[in-house]
Image (cartoon, helix red, strand yellow):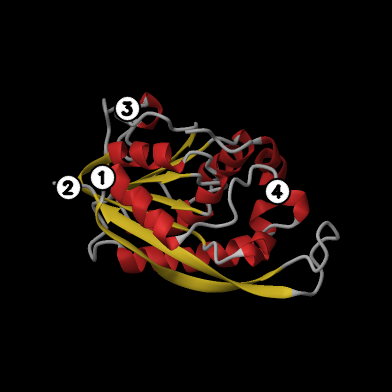
Amino acid sequence: MSPPPSSRFNAEALTWDTNPSVLLATSLAHKSYLSHLPSNTTNLDILELGCGTGLLSLLLAPSVRSLTAVDPAEGMISALESKLSSSHAEVKNVRAVCATLEDADDERVGVDPVTGDKVEKRRFDVVVSHLVLHHVKDLEAFFKVVYGCLKPGGMVAVTDFENFGPEARRFHPEAKMEGVERHGVGRGEMRTLLEGAGFEGVSVETAFEMEKGVESVPGEGVKEEKMVFPFLICTGRKGE
């Protein structure tokens, strides 16, 4: 599972949380996740892949037992660690890990964020990932790792913008095409990938729609034009 280039995200880490589109997409994704997770989330151990600066991590954390937040960009993880170490931090059940997860048995995700205990071959109740899939070169390998990270009966829930045709390319300005492997994800593609990885009860549906500024002329920067982008939430369960 090839990681997205980290150079762009290291550079953007310090200003990531000031991007209105990032904040809005995270808030909407959080609401969608909560509507798809089990009604009682207090005992859930969650693994988040591609956590960035922890915007979604810190929204989900109060509702669950623990959250292990993983990202390959050191700058993003450093930003999250700063939040977690702040004297004002209220969240105590999140652990940040700088890694590209290519093996479900990776010992770097084996430490329980709550107890600090190291658990061999630690598995999770839920794996989430938001706005990451379009950066992953090999999605087949990605979902095989996700499947391996889950406990029997565990759930995957991922969100990303939908590839609805050529216009989906406009989601990113030309200056931010580094590390973009595809312009959104397709419904049929996602169903095939999840079922191919072994997931049962696969669902691919619209999670929300979001208006976002786009370039009118490629390379000239985002000005006044806006477009509405649909986002998908894709879920499935590992057999008991």
Depth check, mark 2 against mark 3: the one in front is 2
| Amino acid on which the number 4 mark rests in the picture | Met
Q: Which residue is mark 4?
A: 177
Image side of residue 23 versus residue 153, left or right: right
Q: Label 3's element? A: loop
Label 3 and label 4: CA atoms lie apart by 32 Å
> In the rendered structure, are the residues bearing label 3 and label 1 in contact, judged by CB atoms less than 8 Å apart?
no
Q: Using the image as rendered, state which of residue 214 and residue 120 is in the foreground.
A: 214
Mark 2, residue position: 239
Looking at the rendered structure, the kind of residue marked 1 is Gly
Report the disc number at residue 198.
1
Q: Earlier in the sequence, mark 3 or mark 4?
A: 3
Mark closer to the chain start, 3 or 1 = 3
Tell me which corner region of the image, top left, top right, bottom left or bottom right, holds residue 49: top left
Of the numbered discs 4 and 1, the one sitting upstream in the chain is: 4
Residue 196 is situated, as x and y percent measured from the top left of the image, at 31, 45
Image location of residue 172, percent across then percent down:
69, 57
- The residue at the far left in this view is 240
Residue with the mark numbered 3: 105
Label placed on residue 52: none
